[in-house]
Amino acid sequence: MTHLHIFALNEPITTSHTNLTRQKGETPALPPLAEWLGLDALDTDQIELFPISDLGGMDLSDYVQLAFTPEDGIPADNQRRINTLEGSILLVPDDAITGTLSPGPQATLIATIPLAQADNSAVLPKADVARPPTQAAHTEPEREATPPIALYMLLGMAVFAVLAIFVGWG
């Protein structure tokens, strides 16, 4: 099961590093987050780091619910705890972690929430894919395409013009 770890940062951070900032191509200088969490490595392409004030009036629990899809929602005690946070937070899914979490004084673990995962255990029947029919050797040869109607109209106008010239001379 994959989890989301929610940390309150005890250092003054004004940097935002989120999915949205990555999509915009922003690459801020990040503090040594792996070191702060006691990890061998941290995939910063999967984390979210931002000041709580960036959420405006939105509760952090609502943001986590929308951005990470917890397995069974966020338990009420965790909601209360994370909605009272101030300063900056760090959201770290298990997939971003190499090593064992052992946060130092720079980060305080507030909650760990199980995330929803795809259930790929279904056994589905194979689709019946029809093969394209093969052409038989005795098929009719392809017909030439008929000329467009504009060509007939052009020929008709030319014949009419020639007739009009002859009638006018006669």
Image: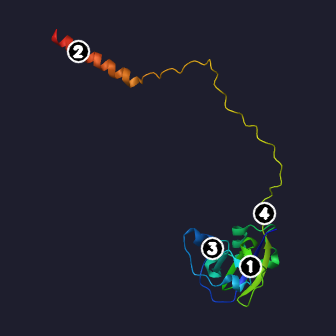
Q: Residues within 10 Å of mark 4 (few under 14, many from 20)?
A: few
Quarter where residue 63 is shown: bottom right
Residue 32 on image: x %, y %: 65, 84
Q: Is residue 78 left or right of residue 89?
A: right
Residue 85 on image: x %, y %: 71, 84
**Residue 129 vs residue 14, the one in the foreground:** 129
Q: Measure how far apart labels 1 and 4 are at the Cα level.
A: 18 Å
Residue 22 on image: x %, y %: 59, 71
Q: Amino acid at mark 4?
A: Gln
**Residue 7 vs residue 63, the one in the foreground:** 7
Instruction: Tell me the residue at 64%/22% (across/down).
Output: 136
**Secondary element type, mark 2:** helix
Q: Amino acid at mark 1?
A: Ile
Q: Measure how far apart labels 4 and 2 are at the Cα level.
A: 82 Å
Quadrant holding the N terminus: bottom right
**Secondary element type, mark 3:** loop
Q: Is residue 52 left or right of residue 150?
A: right
Disc 4 target residue: 117
Q: Earlier in the sequence, mark 3 or mark 2?
A: 3
Q: Earlier in the sequence, mark 1 or mark 4?
A: 1
Disc 3 target residue: 18
Q: Earlier in the sequence, mark 4 or mark 2?
A: 4
Residue 51 on image: x %, y %: 63, 82
Q: Is residue 142 left or right of residue 138?
A: left
Q: Measure how far apart labels 2 and 1 are at the Cα level.
A: 91 Å
Q: Are marks 4 and 3 in contact (CB under 8 Å)?
A: no
Disc 1 target residue: 6
Quarter where residue 27 is shown: bottom right
